[in-house]
Amino acid sequence: MKRSTCGRTFGAAAVSIVSVLAMSFTGVAAQAGPEPAPTEQALAELIAAGRKAAPVTGSGSGGSGSACTSGSGAGSGNGSGNCFGGSGSSSGSAGGFASDTVGYGPPMTAWLAAFGYGLTHPDVAPPGANDWHCKPTAEHPRPVVLLHGTWMNAYNGFAYMGQPIKDAGFCTFTFNYGRANLLQGGGLGSVLPGVMGTGYIGDSAKQLATFVDRVLAATGADKVDIIAHSQGGAMANWYTKFEGGAAEVRNLVTYGATHHGTSLVGIGALGRAINNFGIDILGFIEIFVGHAGIQQTVGSEFVQKLNANGDTVPGVDYTIVGTRYDEITNPYDLTFLQAGPGVQVDNITLQDGCEQDVSDHLTMMYSPRALSIALRALDPAGHPQLECTFNPWLIGGGGAL
C-alpha cells in the first residue's frame, strides 16, 4: 500500500510538472488563432536587425568562452570564440554528452501524454526505433535518423511518428543528444531527468556525426535521411555544413526548425536589442534556458555562422515544415530555407490545404498530416497523398489524450 501511495504521489507531481511546462511552452497557442503573419518587409527587417547584432564582450571567472570547445572552465565566459553562443556571457562551463536509449516506451498519439511519460522515462526509445539488426532494402535504401528538439528527448519527440515510419519499411534510429546539467550550462530545466538538447549546438552536432557513423556502419548504407524537430533541424543543418554531414545525408526533413533563429514570442528579439546596448540580459536568461536556447535566438553568433554561406548545401534535399500556430519558432517563416544553386527545397506550411490542423510547435510532431509529409519526402512514389485531420495545439492526438 505504501508503495502504491508513493507511486500516486510521484505521478501527481509529474503531471503537475508537465502541466506547468506545457503551459509555459504553449500558452500563446491557446489564443483563438495565430497572430497575423508579418509582412515580407517586416520579416526582412527583423532578420537584418538580428544578424547585425554584435556579441557583447563580458568578463568572468570562466575565461573567454573558448571553454565551449575545450570542455574546461566554469563561470561566465563571453560566449564568443568557437562556441557561437552570441549571448554575452555563457552561464556555466561547456560539457554534456549524448546517450543511447534503453528499452522502449509505448506509442502515443497525444503530445502532452508523451511529454509526461518522457519526463519520467528519459532514456527509453520511441516505438519502432533502434533495431540495430534492421537492414535497408532496395525500396528504402537509407536508414532514417530522428532528432528531438530542445527540452525534449528521443522518446517524446517521436512517440507518435516512430512506429509508422518503421512500419513503412524504414530502419529508424535515434538517440538523446545535448545532455548538459546545470553546471554545464544546461539551464534550470536540465534538473528534470527527461530534459535534453540543452548543451551547445555545435557539440551536439559532433554527437550526431558520431551517431550517424554508427548507423551507417551497422546498416551498410552510404547515406541517411534525417527527420528533425526544432533545434534538431538547426543542429542537423550545422552538421551538414561543418561536421561532414553533407556527404552522409540525402534528405533533411525538419519541423519548426530554428534555422534562422527565433524571436521566441518577442523575448529573444527584445533581449538581442538590449544586448546591443551593452546590457547582457541574454546571458542572464541563459541561466534558465541553457546554452542551446540562447543560441537559437535571432541574430546569435550561432545563427549567423549557420547561414553565412547560404541556407543549404549541395547534395541534400530539404523538406521544411512550419505551422502558423508556432509559438516557439516565430515568426514561423524563419524556419523556411532559400535554396542554393542546384539544391531542392520544399517549404511547406502545415495549414496549406488543411486549415483544421492547428498544430503548434510541439503538437506538430503528433499530427497525421506532418507524418504524411515526412513519408512523402522519404518515399514520394509509395506515399504520395497527404492526410488532413484535426490536430489541436497543446494536446495533439486529435484532441484526445
Image (tube, grey):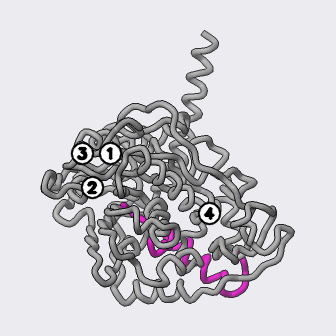
Residue 398 seen in the figure: no
Q: What is the C-alpha distance between the residues marked 4 and 3? A: 35 Å
Residue lying farthest right? 61
The front one of 252 and 131 is: 131
Q: Give the structural element (helix, strand or loop) at label 4.
A: loop
The front one of 198 and 7 is: 198
In the rendered structure, which disc, 3 or 2, sits on the residue that comes first in sequence? 3
Q: What residue type is labelled 4?
A: Tyr
Residue matched to label 2: 374
Residue matched to label 3: 137
Q: Is residue 82 above or below residue 371?
A: below
| Location of residue 303 in the rendering, given as x and y in whole percent from the top left corner | 52, 76
Quadrant containing the C terminus is top left
Q: What is the C-alpha distance between the residues marked 1 and 3? A: 20 Å
Residue 340 seen in the figure: yes
Residue stretch in magenta: 254-280
| Location of residue 146 in the rendering, given as x and y in whole percent from the top left corner | 40, 51
Residue matched to label 4: 200
| Residues at circles 1 and 2 in contact by the CB criterion of under 8 Å | yes
Residue matched to label 1: 161
The front one of 246 and 99 is: 246
In the rendered structure, which disc, 1 or 2, sits on the residue that comes first in sequence? 1
Q: Which amino acid does label 3 sit on?
A: Thr
Q: What is the C-alpha distance between the residues marked 4 and 1? A: 26 Å
Looking at the image, residue 375 sits to the left or right of residue 59; the answer is left
Q: Mark 4 or mark 3, which is nearer to you?
A: 3
| Residues at circles 3 and 2 in contact by the CB criterion of under 8 Å | no
In the rendered structure, which disc, 4 or 3, sits on the residue that comes first in sequence? 3
